[in-house]
């Protein structure tokens, strides 16, 4: 799904922002970038440097001479801006937008328009958008850096459309939970050690049993933790015998 999302930067002034945008996209798994009338020529050394290892995205970026050219195949057009406009398109948060896209998968490919650093998207650019995404920010200081805005939107797209969120973990057998039988074994071992050390008063046994059971349930012991406890209890029992 992420390859159905196209980031379109309109009239970007600073090549560094284009490089940082490529990087922001790649870490979230987006790949399609279009540059509409960028101020500098591409390839550009500063953009390449800021892209870090996302230079493939820069190399494959479409260079367009109009928004229409960049949007040609898009079925949904989304503008991004911190500012509300007088003739508004429907204003949504990034999360509301991803929910809308998820409910209407027939509306892909989606083009996301980002404005120029100094003045943002023009009203004419924004009016043609189906939706206006505003990333909620401090009302007194609402404008994000261009690549940061791309980063946040790409992150929301990743959260919404990529199922495997975290790297796969391999859990060692020793770090798995103990069975109920093993729990009973630990409780009996405690009981034995408490008796042998003289800690356990017969009339308190029931209360201690319940609380020890509750304590060990809360601990959610792993195999390795159980081995430490049982090793220690064995040493206590041996000392007392
Ligand atoms: N000074 C401009 C801001 C340009 S920032 C203005 O007042 O509009 C460059 C681009 O980053 C914006 O055009 C927009 O695409 C994006 N952006 C910045 N902050 C944003 C926000 N809070 N929500 C959505 N997009 C934002």
Image (spheres, rainbow, N blue to C red):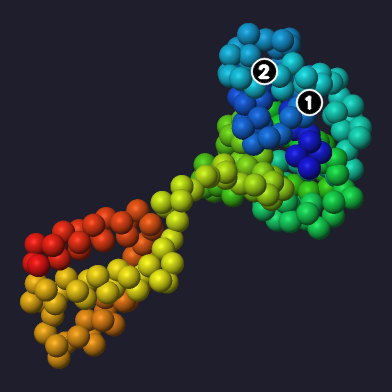
Looking at the image, residue 12 sits to the left or right of residue 108; the answer is left
6 or 52: nearer the viewer:
52
Residue 71 % position (x, y)? 87, 33
200 or 5: nearer the viewer:
200
Q: Residue furthest front?
A: 241
Looking at the rendered image, the quarter that the N terminus falls into is top right
Position of 187 relative to 124 (above/below): below
Q: Which residue is mark 2?
A: 55
For the residue carrying disc 2, how many other residues have a C-alpha within 10 Å: few (<14), some (14-19), or many (20+)?
Answer: some
Q: Residue furthest right?
A: 72
Q: Residue at x 87, y 48 (%)?
A: 107
**Mark 1 touching mark 2, by CB under 8 A?**
no
Report which quarter residue 150 is drawn in: top right
Position of 65 relative to 72 (above/below): above
Label tally: 2
Looking at the image, residue 230 sits to the left or right of residue 35; the answer is left
Looking at the image, residue 203 sits to the left or right of residue 119; the answer is left
Looking at the rendered image, the disc whose residue lies closer to the viewer, 1 or 2, is 2
Q: Which residue is mark 1?
A: 34
Residue 231 % position (x, y)? 23, 57
**Residue 151 visible, this angle:** yes
Residue 174 % position (x, y)? 41, 51
Q: Residue at x 61, y 20 (%)?
A: 53
For the residue carrying disc 1, how many other residues have a C-alpha within 10 Å: few (<14), some (14-19), or many (20+)?
Answer: many
The tag earlier along the polypeptide, 1 or 2, is 1
Q: Residue at x 58, y 19 (%)?
A: 52
């Amino acid at each position: 799904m992420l390859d159905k999302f196209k980031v379109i930067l309109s009239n970007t002034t600073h090549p560094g922002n284009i490089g940082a945008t490529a990087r922001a996209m790649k870490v979230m798994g987006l790949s399609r970038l279009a540059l509409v009338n960028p101020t500098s020529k591409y390839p550009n050394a500063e953009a390449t440097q800021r892209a870090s290892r996302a230079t493939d995205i820069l190399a494959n970026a479409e260079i367009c001479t109009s928004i229409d050219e960049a949007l040609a195949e898009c079925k949904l057009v989304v503008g991004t801006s911190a500012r509300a406009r007088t003739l508004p398109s429907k204003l949504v948060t990034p999360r509301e937008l991803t929910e809308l896209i998820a409910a209407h998968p027939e509306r892909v490919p989606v083009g996301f328009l980002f404005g120029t650093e100094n003045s943002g998207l023009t009203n004419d650019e924004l009016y043609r958008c189906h939706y206006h995404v505003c990333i909620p920010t401090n009302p007194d200081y609402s404008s994000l850096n261009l690549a940061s805005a791309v980063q946040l939107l790409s992150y929301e797209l990743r959260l919404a459309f990529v199922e495997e969120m975290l790297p796969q973990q391999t859990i060692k057998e020793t770090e798995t939970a103990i069975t109920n039988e093993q729990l009973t074994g630990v409780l009996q071992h405690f009981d034995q050690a408490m008796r042998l050390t003289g800690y356990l008063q017969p009339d308190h046994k029931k209360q201690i049993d319940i609380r020890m059971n509750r304590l060990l349930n809360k601990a959610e012991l792993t195999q390795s933790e159980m081995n430490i406890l049982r090793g220690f209890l064995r040493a206590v029992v041996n000392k007392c015998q």
